[in-house]
Image (cartoon, grey):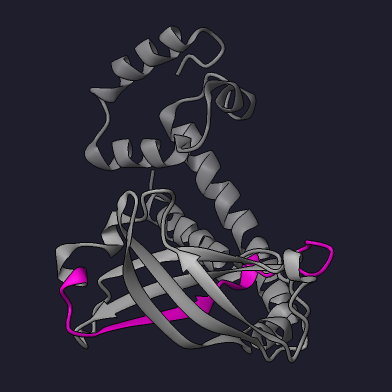
């Protein structure tokens, strides 16, 4: 590869190499360069061969990812009590209606938010899921947001009535299809998105979705093992 020249030089060198790669080697190359720009590639693997690049990435991931996974597992364990407490933030009597608005049908969710946790909240987001006609599969899903700063926050043991407009000015059309508007019954569920919960200083209670990050790192390890024969 030519990594210390222009983008055109690099592309020309790759085009020349590509014809000699097997499908397995091509998959490995595409995996190895994913997320790297030319500057980063040249810094890590200056004018390397495809095999040198793949082997370097395989070695790095096999070396680094187990430590990163363990660190995230430790963080997830430390956050487990907070995550459990956040599940005590819930909604009661959630209902879904489609109202007539200036721009047409407007999807609305109404619910009573109950903070049964020990954590004061300034803001939190919810995953809203809509079911129609008692079906097991959801008809629509989105995120909605609660901002409690105008009411001096939502302290523990407090509750408040919330009204969410789904979508922006015109509303989310995925929530106002004919099938939804003509449904005999509707049921909406709201579940807290833990990493969105903010304290009274607008700081998150949990530092991201560690389980999702762990899953991605494990997938990287699986791909590295697949290309370890290059």
Question: Residue 58 lies in magenta, yes or no?
Answer: no
- Judge left or right: residue 166 versus residue 178: right
**Can residue 122 be seen from the camera position used here?**
no
Q: Position of residue 60 (x, y in %)?
A: 59, 48
- Give the residues in magenta: 181-203
Q: Position of residue 181 (x, y in %)?
A: 20, 70
For image coordinates 49% across by 33% down, the residue present is 52
Between 15 and 154, the one lying in front of the other is 154
For image coordinates 56% across by 52% down, the residue present is 61
Q: Picture quarter containing residue 114? A: bottom right
Question: Residue 185 lies in magenta, yes or no?
Answer: yes
**Can residue 1 be seen from the camera position used here?**
yes
Q: Is residue 146 above or below residue 52?
A: below
Between 20 and 163, the one lying in front of the other is 163
Q: Is residue 33 above or below residue 63?
A: above
Between 4 and 184, the one lying in front of the other is 184
């Amino acid at each position: 590869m030519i990594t210390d020249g222009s983008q055109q030089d690099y592309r020309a060198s790759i085009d020349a190499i590509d014809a000699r790669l097997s499908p397995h080697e091509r998959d490995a190359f595409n995996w190895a360069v994913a997320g790297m720009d030319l500057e980063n590639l040249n810094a890590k693997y200056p004018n390397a061969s495809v095999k040198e690049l793949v082997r370097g990435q395989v070695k790095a991931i096999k070396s680094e990812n187990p430590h990163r996974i363990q660190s995230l597992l430790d963080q997830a364990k430390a956050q487990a009590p907070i995550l459990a407490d956040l599940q005590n933030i819930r909604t009661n009597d959630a209902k879904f209606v489609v109202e007539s608005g200036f721009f047409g049908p407007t999807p609305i969710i109404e619910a009573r938010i109950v903070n049964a946790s020990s954590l004061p909240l300034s803001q939190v987001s919810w995953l809203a899921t809509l079911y129609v006609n008692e079906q097991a599969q959801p008809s629509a899903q989105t995120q909605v947001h609660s901002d409690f700063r105008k009411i001096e926050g939502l302290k523990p043991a407090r509750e408040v009535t919330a009204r969410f407009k789904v979508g922006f000015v015109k509303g989310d059309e995925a929530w106002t299809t004919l099938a939804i508007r003509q449904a005999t019954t509707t049921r909406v569920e709201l579940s807290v998105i833990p990493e969105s919960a903010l304290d009274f200083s607008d700081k998150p209670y949990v530092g991201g979705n560690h389980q999702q990050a762990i899953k991605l790192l494990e997938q990287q390890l699986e791909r590295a093992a697949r290309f370890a024969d290059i």
